[in-house]
Image: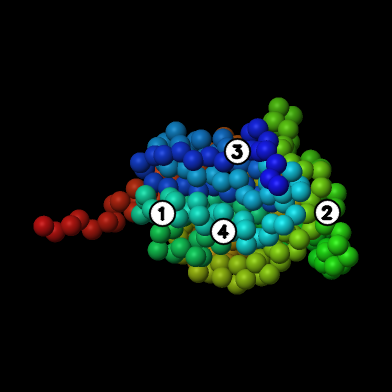
Amino acid sequence: MSHPIIPGAESISIEGSRGGVLLLHGYMGTVQTVRDWALAFARTDFSVEAPLLPGHGTSVEDQLETRWSDYLECAENAYKKLAARHPRVFVGGLCTGGMLAASLAVRHPDTLAGLISVNGLFILPKHWNFSFLEEMEQTNRRCFPWFRGKSIEDPAAPALIGYEQAAVAPIVSMRPAKVELLERLGEITRPALVFTSLRDKVVPPEDTKTWSQKLAGPIEYVELERSNHVATLDYDKGIIEARSVSFALAVTQAEHNHTPERVA
């Protein structure tokens, strides 16, 4: 039985005429972490989708039976919704949301406009001991205490919506998906905007360089000097919003300028 959505975690769907933008939150996060980012695009007249991933924003019991494939299906459905209205779609994400965004970028080379990543988690953390997690899964231990350490530097930022416990099976399901995606990042030829928090305690800045250099298209890097992992709610959130919108506008304008005029 599904539990009610926690206020502030709800999905976003906003119509615009300039183009499509899909923003994805990370594992154990909610749309709260990308809401202001999404609204910045909406104010510039982009259509924006920011779905709440299955099992998130309600209760950990709802997360138990979810897997990476469920998150990817949710993201895929949101992408198709935008692609039905716009010839090009930008995909972006925070943490594992960046991994989801890149997975969509690989799947949709013909309609992808560009990729945006904020502290994208493509190299799974060393403290995610998969042997231990798989052992827990085999012994029917379904949850474990989730890390609740500091992920935002700004004391004025809102408290993060999340769970005290994490489901084991969804994390285990990410491992093969990560391996496959890293092998296919070179298929992404569209422009990418990559944000890195220098104070990130979850995704080390050097990990960002490692995965992003596999991309085949032009890359713009932005270092966030004051923010921790959830930078979209931290001191540098304004930089993320402004640079992301500028990036999308520039790519959209370049597409328009290179579109051949129809001959009557």
State the residue in front, 67 or 183.
67
Q: Amino acid at mark 1?
A: Ala
Distance from Cα at disc 4 to Cα at disc 2: 23 Å
Residue 119 image offset from top left, x and y in percent: 65, 50
The mark nearer the N terminus, 3 or 2, is: 3
Q: Nearer the viewer, mark 1 or mark 2?
A: 2
Question: Are dots 1 and 3 in contact, CB under 8 Å?
Answer: no
Q: Position of residue 168 (x, y in %)?
A: 79, 58
Q: Position of residue 171 (x, y in %)?
A: 74, 59
Residue count near mark 2 (Cα–Cα under 10 Å), binned few <14, some 14–19, many ≥20: some
Q: Quadrant of residue 142?
A: bottom right
Q: Are marks 4 and 2 in contact (CB under 8 Å)?
A: no
| Residue carrying label 4 | 73
Asked whether disc 3 touches disc 2, contact meaning CB atoms under 8 Å apart, the reply is: no
- Contact, mark 4 vs mark 3 (Cβ under 8 Å): no
Q: What residue sits right under mark 3 in the picture?
A: 10
User: Is 70 above or below relative to 57?
Assistant: below
Q: Which residue is mark 1?
A: 83
Q: Secondary structure at mark 4?
A: helix
**The furthest residue to the left:** 264
Name which of mark 1 and mark 2 comes first in the sequence.
1
